[in-house]
């Protein structure tokens, strides 16, 4: 995220609730504020803000936006298999 | 706005320009790209956008001490480094010195999932960080349209792009944005809507199997600019843009005279030779002795210790040297002394632009005071009339600027109908000598006359000239009852006159 914008606050709130619901006790979330650590943007190839980067398990995946679409987030985090 | 007002406002605030360092481009933009504003470079694939923008950054760092950031959406830093290594630029060294920073932005659609609202603040932060890290004055975004393939929310992208270009302006960096050419628009994603201060279009066209790259400044707010399409080249030294003609006609002139090496021709010109730095055309049909005249001009220059560069587009240098020995011209000692240099190439090996550049380079390197081009008519095989003409205009322009005397030879085919050379250069040259066959009494003799020679009171007669083992000689005019006498008719006339004078002497 880049500063405490409404979008990033919403995203973090959404993420916490999904994790609590599905991954209670098995997750860790690292919050990086690019305004404070701009050099970290390059390493993770961050363009859009807010971006959720899932590092493990592989493959690395980026979910951008305020994470308001629960279904998409869960699929992106490989918690749920994509349903046609 | 009235003219007066315009002049006044110009004096008040002139648009600042950042020199690109690309040879020729700064000439047609009258100083470079607009400082602190974004410039859009667009063109189809493979027309040199990335190289153009990269060169802008590299030359800025090397020549103008302006650090630059290259945001690459397409290629990685290592790839870019390898690409420009062939041009002699050491990108990694420049990166190590903090003069250039390359930031590769990788967008992979398969990795990205979009949910809800977002913005591109991450990109802004990265760019800001990169710019501040080295104090960059120049920024390149190559090719920002890749964002459109990675992210699907067009509305967000467009508003963010608008914000990005405004942000670049506020940041005060001179930016170059590249964009792929679209079908109906300048760029596929309509970037020209956002970047509207300066737009340059690159083009790569193939005509008659020979490709030419061209560049055009579509728009340049607040500045004059050359509006033509200018050919440009990519060679081992990067990009060079060649303006068709210099924009003003104010070349230095000399009234010094250079001898032609043929005493009688000097006399015919009325000034003992041609002006130094002038251009001379020798045209005529096949076998009239064009190369011989050019060679004797070169030989005279060599004898006077002037450097001479001989461009041979038809014969090999060895052939010319051997053949000229038969008319008493021995180039060997001067080639050894390096006062004479041959430059031979086939016109068809590359396009006109490449030739022009090669010629420019050869001249800059050797610094001759006389240039011979034998023959220019061969260029018609690789370009049409107007292209060859345009190239020669530029060449003559350049030579005059450098105060180099030049002699062209040209083969004219339709000599009977109009005395126009195939290349239409006659109006560009200062002096024009025409060689023609004179066929009478079953003989073919060579005639020479001066069609024009600017600034000289030259002879208007057709004179017979003879090429012998002693060189070229122009014989005196003998007029018989049927006009000018040539060949054996002239000789009979001379003999007859001699006899007559003998007789009168005896009496």
Image: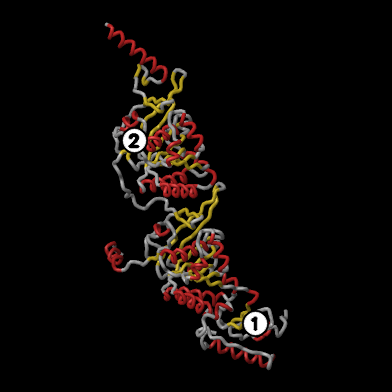
Instruction: Give the answer, above or below, for where A74 lies relative to B77.
Output: below
Residue at (37% x, 39% y) in the render: B305
Q: Nearer the viewer, mark 1 or mark 2?
A: 2
Which label is found at residue B119?
A: none
Q: What's the coloring here?
A: secondary structure
Q: Position of residue B195 (x, y in %)?
A: 46, 69
Mark 1 and mark 2: span between their CA atoms?
Answer: 82 Å
Residue designated by label 1? A55
How packed mark 2 is, by other alpha carbons closer than 10 Å (few <14, some 14-19, many 20 or more), is some
Please, which residue is most extreme toward the top here? B507
Residue designated by label 2? B259
Quadrant in which the C terminus of chain B appears: top left
* Left or right of residue B153: residue B476: left
Quadrant in which the N terminus of chain B appears: bottom left
Please tell me whether mark 2 sits on a helix, a strand or a loop. loop
Residue at (46% x, 50% y) in the render: B357
């Amino acid at each position: 995220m880049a500063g405490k914008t409404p979008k990033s606050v919403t995203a973090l709130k959404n993420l916490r609730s999904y994790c609590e619901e599905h991954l209670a006790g098995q997750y860790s979330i690292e919050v990086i504020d690019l305004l404070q650590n701009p050099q970290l943007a390059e390493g993770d190839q961050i363009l859009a803000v807010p971006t959720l980067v899932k590092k493990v398990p592989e493959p690395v995946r980026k979910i951008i936006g305020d994470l308001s679409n629960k279904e998409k987030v869960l699929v992106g985090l490989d918690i749920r298999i994509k349903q046609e | 706005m009235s003219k007066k007002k315009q002049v006044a406002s110009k004096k008040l605030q002139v648009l600042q320009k950042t020199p690109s360092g690309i040879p020729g481009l700064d000439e047609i933009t009258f100083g470079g790209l607009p400082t602190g504003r974004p410039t859009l470079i667009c063109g189809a694939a493979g027309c040199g956008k990335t190289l153009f923008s990269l060169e802008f950054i590299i030359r800025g760092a090397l020549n103008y001490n302006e650090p630059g950031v290259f945001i690459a959406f397409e290629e990685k830093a290592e790839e870019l480094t390898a690409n420009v290594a062939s041009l002699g630029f050491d990108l990694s060294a420049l990166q190590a010195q903090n003069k250039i920073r390359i930031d590769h932005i990788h967008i992979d659609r398969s990795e990205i999932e979009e949910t809800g609202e977002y913005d591109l603040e991450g990109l802004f932060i990265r760019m800001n960080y990169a710019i501040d890290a080295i104090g960059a004055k120049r920024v390149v975004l190559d090719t920002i349209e890749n964002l459109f393939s990675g992210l699907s929310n067009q509305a967000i992208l467009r508003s963010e792009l608008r914000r990005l270009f405004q942000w670049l302006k506020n940041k005060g960096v001179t930016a170059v944005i590249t964009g792929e050419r679209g079908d109906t628009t300048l760029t596929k994603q309509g970037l020209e809507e956002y970047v509207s201060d300066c737009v340059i279009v690159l083009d790569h066209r193939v005509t008659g199997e020979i490709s030419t790259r061209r560049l055009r400044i579509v728009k340049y707010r607040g500045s004059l600019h050359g509006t033509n399409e200018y050919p440009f080249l990519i060679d081992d030294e990067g990009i060079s843009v060649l303006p068709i003609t210099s924009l003003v006609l104010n070349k230095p002139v000399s009234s010094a005279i250079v001898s032609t090496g043929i005493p009688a021709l000097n006399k015919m010109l009325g000034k003992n030779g041609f002006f130094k730095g002038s251009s001379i055309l020798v045209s005529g049909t096949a076998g009239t002795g064009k190369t011989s005249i050019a060679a004797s001009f070169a030989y005279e220059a060599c004898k006077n210790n002037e450097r001479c560069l001989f461009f041979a587009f038809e014969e090999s240098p060895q052939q010319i040297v051997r053949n000229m020995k038969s008319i008493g011209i021995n180039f060997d000692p001067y080639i050894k002394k390096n006062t004479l240099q041959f430059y031979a190439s086939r016109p068809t090996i590359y396009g006109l632009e490449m030739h022009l550049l090669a010629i420019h380079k050869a001249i800059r390197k050797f610094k001759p005071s006389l240039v011979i081009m034998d023959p220019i008519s061969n260029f018609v095989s690789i370009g049409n009339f107007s292209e060859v003409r345009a190239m020669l205009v530029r060449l003559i322009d350049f030579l005059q600027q450098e105060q180099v005397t030049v002699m062209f030879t040209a083969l004219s085919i339709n000599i009977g109908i109009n005395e126009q050379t195939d290349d239409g250069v006659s109006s560009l040259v200062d002096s024009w000598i025409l060689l023609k066959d004179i066929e009478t009494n079953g003989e073919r003799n060579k005639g020479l006359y001066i069609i024009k020679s600017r600034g000289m009171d030259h002879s208007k007669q057709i004179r017979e000239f003879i090429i012998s083992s002693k060189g070229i000689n122009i014989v005196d005019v003998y007029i018989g009852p049927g006009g000018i006498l040539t060949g054996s008719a002239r000789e009979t006339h001379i003999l007859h006159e001699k006899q007559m004078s003998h007789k009168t002497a005896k009496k």
